[in-house]
């Protein structure tokens, strides 16, 4: 049952998980907007809530379930008329979710999401006729229920056409550009290939078209994301990869900052390092998850690399890009990680001194090889090791930030807040060494007169004057 196009209806879209998931949500938002369905920020102001879930690790799954239950309660109480759940958790556990949370009106697996508006209309239509207390999934046919193999270019190119109707959920000046879908690696801790399939890169011309469209909207910073950015293009047989893509994106003058996330040390090469150094608007920033620093643990993880290879890659990167900011991700508590092997990890971190580090405790993922491996450290041991890594990294960051004091840095303004009761404002910004959402910020004090001329999306020079936790503070260099 569908509603007439003239009937007002609105959706609160809740996006959980990683930046790749956020792109899916933006694709959904685009389809909803073109169908005349309003997008609201608060569930109380909407007819229906769509939750785009994450199913990557225990904590992410629990957050997704807790979020679904919270909105299920709003439906039971009549605050909203319907609830739709989509994303990675649905791909993994749809039957279990349907059995345990009957308040959900529809579960949508990974798809091109073009059918989301018709799903929303059908759910709201049933709520109008049967009342908001109706529960149980509605049956749908057609658009938007396809699996990841038939995704559009917006989320893993099949036909190769660009999705230019994406509705950004980030501030317009910064956006993610997803290079493709899926992954060809078989890491023993990761369920992504099971969820999203093998690598499907978007063609280079499609990505350039999408990036150009973002630039025309006002985007000045793009972050390239994929399961493995350095694997980009290898499945297409076209003879190009990430270096060629960066060179083409570098020709889009409006894109002042281009940032590379999710590189893999096993697929990193000197061609990419040289290109990053040569293309002016490609930032000297690289996110390269190494996961561990012990040979045996890396082998058990099936990472296809080694501590020696990691050291070699880092040395080559820093030689090619002297001012490089290097971010990594570490996984502790994997089966076979003894205290001695954890010590090897700490030795690697001490030697390399990554600029940015994220660390997670291992959780077994259904359908992955790690589930069947013995010798897993206790949960408490894993958490203790995670805290040890982060304690070490806090010291590294503090030392690095002290060296920034007194220097002038270019920053991108993310927002400006007027301070209550004071004749001043605070700009929240990021330097080229700070990726959106995952790194630190630059907090810029502004006078009332300065604040009038500072807008989100502006690039400004700031003199760093101090440190505040993980962030630095400063003032405009005028």
Image (tube, rainbow, N blue to C red):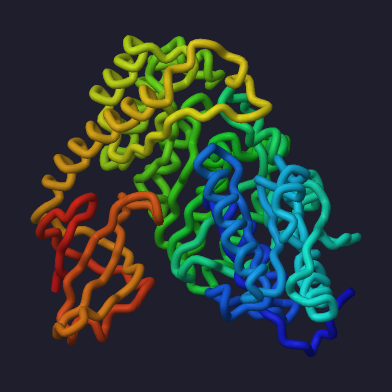
Locate residue 242: give its quadrant. Answer: top right
For the residue pair 44 and 297, the one nearer the viewer reads as: 44
Q: Is residue 472 above or below residue 212?
A: above
For the residue pair 430 and 382, the one nearer the viewer reads as: 382
Residue closest to the far bottom: 6
Going 29% across and 25% down the picture, which residue do you hit? 349
Judge left or right: residue 224 versus residue 292.
right
Q: Is residue 446 above or below residue 278?
A: below
Residue 378: x percent and y percent?
42, 20
Is residue 248 shown to the viewer in this render? no
Going 58% across and 22% down the picture, which residue do you hit? 188
Going 40% across and 56% down the picture, which residue do you hit? 436
For the residue pair 5 and 443, the one nearer the viewer reads as: 5
Going 18% across and 86% down the picture, which residue do you hit? 449
Is residue 453 shown to the viewer in this render? yes
For the residue pair 432 and 143, the one nearer the viewer reads as: 143
Locate residue 478: give its quadrant. Answer: bottom left
Query: What is the tally of numbered marks visible in this picture?
Result: 0
Q: Is residue 143 above or below residue 265?
A: below
Residue 207: x percent and y percent?
62, 55
Residue 301: x percent and y percent?
53, 19
Rendered-image quadrant of the N terminus = bottom right
């Amino acid at each position: 049952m569908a509603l007439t196009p003239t009937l007002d209806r609105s959706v609160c879209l809740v996006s959980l998980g990683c930046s790749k998931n956020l792109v899916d949500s933006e694709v959904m938002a685009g389809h909803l907007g073109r169908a005349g369905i309003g997008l609201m920020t608060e569930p109380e102001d909407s007819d229906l809530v769509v939750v785009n879930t994450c199913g990557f690790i225990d904590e992410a799954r629990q957050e997704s379930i807790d979020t679904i239950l919270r909105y299920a309660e709003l439906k039971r109480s009549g605050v909203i008329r319907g609830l739709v759940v989509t994303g990675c958790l649905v791909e993994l556990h749809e039957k279990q979710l349907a059995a345990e949370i009957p308040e959900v009106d529809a579960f949508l697996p990974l798809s091109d999401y073009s059918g989301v508006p018709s799903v929303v209309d059908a759910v709201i239509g049933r709520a109008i006729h049967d009342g908001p207390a109706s529960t149980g999934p509605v049956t749908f046919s057609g658009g938007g229920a396809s699996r990841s193999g038939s995704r559009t270019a917006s989320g893993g190119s099949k036909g190769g056409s660009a999705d230019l109707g994406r509705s950004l959920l980030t501030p317009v000046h910064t956006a993610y550009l997803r290079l493709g879908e899926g992954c060809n690696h078989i890491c023993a801790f990761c369920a992504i290939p099971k969820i999203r399939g093998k690598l499907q890169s978007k063609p280079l011309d499609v990505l350039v078209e999408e990036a150009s469209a973002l630039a025309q909207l006002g985007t000045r910073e793009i972050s390239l994301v994929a399961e493995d950015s350095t694997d980009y293009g290898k499945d297409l047989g076209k003879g190009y990869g990430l270096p060629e893509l960066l060179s083409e994106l570098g020709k889009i003058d409006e894109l002042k900052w281009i940032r590379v996330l999710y590189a893999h040390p096993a697929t990193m090469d000197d061609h990419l390092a040289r290109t990053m150094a040569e293309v002016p608007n490609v930032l000297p920033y690289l996110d390269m998850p190494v996961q561990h620093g012990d040979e045996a643990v890396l082998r058990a993880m099936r990472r296809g690399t080694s501590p020696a290879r990691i050291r070699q890659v880092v040395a080559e990167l820093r030689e090619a890009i002297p001012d490089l900011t290097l971010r990594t991700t570490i996984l502790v508590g994997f089966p076979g990680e003894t205290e001695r092997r954890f010590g090897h990890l700490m030795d690697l971190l001490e030697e390399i001194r990554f600029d940015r580090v994220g660390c997670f405790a291992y959780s077994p993922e259904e359908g992955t090889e790690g589930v069947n491996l013995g010798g897993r450290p206790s949960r408490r041991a894993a958490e203790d090791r995670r805290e040890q890594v982060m304690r070490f990294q806090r010291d590294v960051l503090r030392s690095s930030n002290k060296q920034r004091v007194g220097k002038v840095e270019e920053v991108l303004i993310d927002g400006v807040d007027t301070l209550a009761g004071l004749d001043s404002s605070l700009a929240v910004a990021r330097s080229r060494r700070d990726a959106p959402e995952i790194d630190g910020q630059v907090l810029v004090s502004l006078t009332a007169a300065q604040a009038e001329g500072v807008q989100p999306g502006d690039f400004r020079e700031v003199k760093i004057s101090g440190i505040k936790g993980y962030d630095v503070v400063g003032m405009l260099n005028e």
